[in-house]
Image (cartoon, helix red, strand yellow):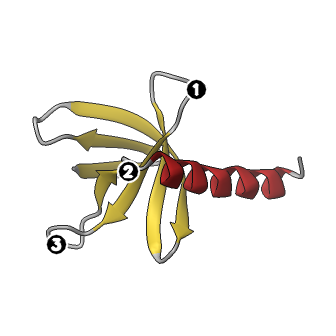
């Protein structure tokens, strides 16, 4: 998947050429890897998407790989929620 970052909006294109639009909420480091926490652009609340950020092609352009492990998604999202909680004082 490729990305085109514009502010905190991100457009991902899958291997079939379909485009998906997200709001980038944050990047989270976990166990030596970086993950992006994204909210589908057509929603203001609801489930977020978590993608692993990698450079698959060696071209210094971030590739976003979907995370299929629900436990890993929960862990990364939990770190994100704690980060927001600390930043907002809630």
Q: Residue at x 38, y 59 (%)?
A: 52
| Disc 1 crowd, CA 10 A, few/some/many (<14, 14-19, 20+) | few
Displayed quadrant of residue 80: bottom right
Looking at the image, is mark 1 or mark 2 earlier in the sequence? 1
Q: CA distance from mark 3 to mark 1?
A: 33 Å
Q: CA distance from mark 2 to mark 3?
A: 22 Å
Query: Of tags 3 and 1, which is closer to the observer?
Result: 1
Query: Of tags 2 and 3, which is closer to the observer?
Result: 2
Q: Residue at x 58, y 25 (%)?
A: 44
Residue 22 place in picture, x, y as percent: 42, 36
Q: Residue at x 55, y 62 (%)?
A: 28
Q: Nearer the viewer, residue 2 or 74?
A: 74
Q: CA distance from mark 1 to mark 2?
A: 18 Å
Displayed quadrant of residue 41: top left
Looking at the picture, does residue 12 appear above or below residue 76? above
Displayed quadrant of residue 19: top left
The residue that mark 2 highlights is 67
* Badge 2 element: loop
In the picture, measured across the screen, residue 81 lies left or right of residue 63, that is right
Q: Residue at x 14, y 68 (%)?
A: 57
Q: State how many labels appear.
A: 3
The residue that mark 3 highlights is 59
The residue that mark 1 highlights is 46
| Disc 3 crowd, CA 10 A, few/some/many (<14, 14-19, 20+) | few
Residue 34 place in picture, x, y as percent: 45, 67
């Amino acid at each position: 998947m490729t990305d085109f970052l514009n502010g905190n909006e991100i457009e991902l294109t899958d291997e079939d050429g379909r485009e998906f639009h997200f709001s980038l909420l944050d990047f989270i480091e976990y166990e030596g890897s970086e993950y992006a926490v994204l909210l589908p652009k057509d929603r203001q609340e609801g489930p977020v998407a978590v993608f692993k950020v990698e450079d698959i092609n060696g071209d210094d352009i971030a590739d976003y790989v979907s995370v299929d492990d629900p436990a890993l998604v929960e862990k990364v999202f939990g770190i994100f929620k704690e980060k927001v909680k600390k930043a907002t004082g809630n």
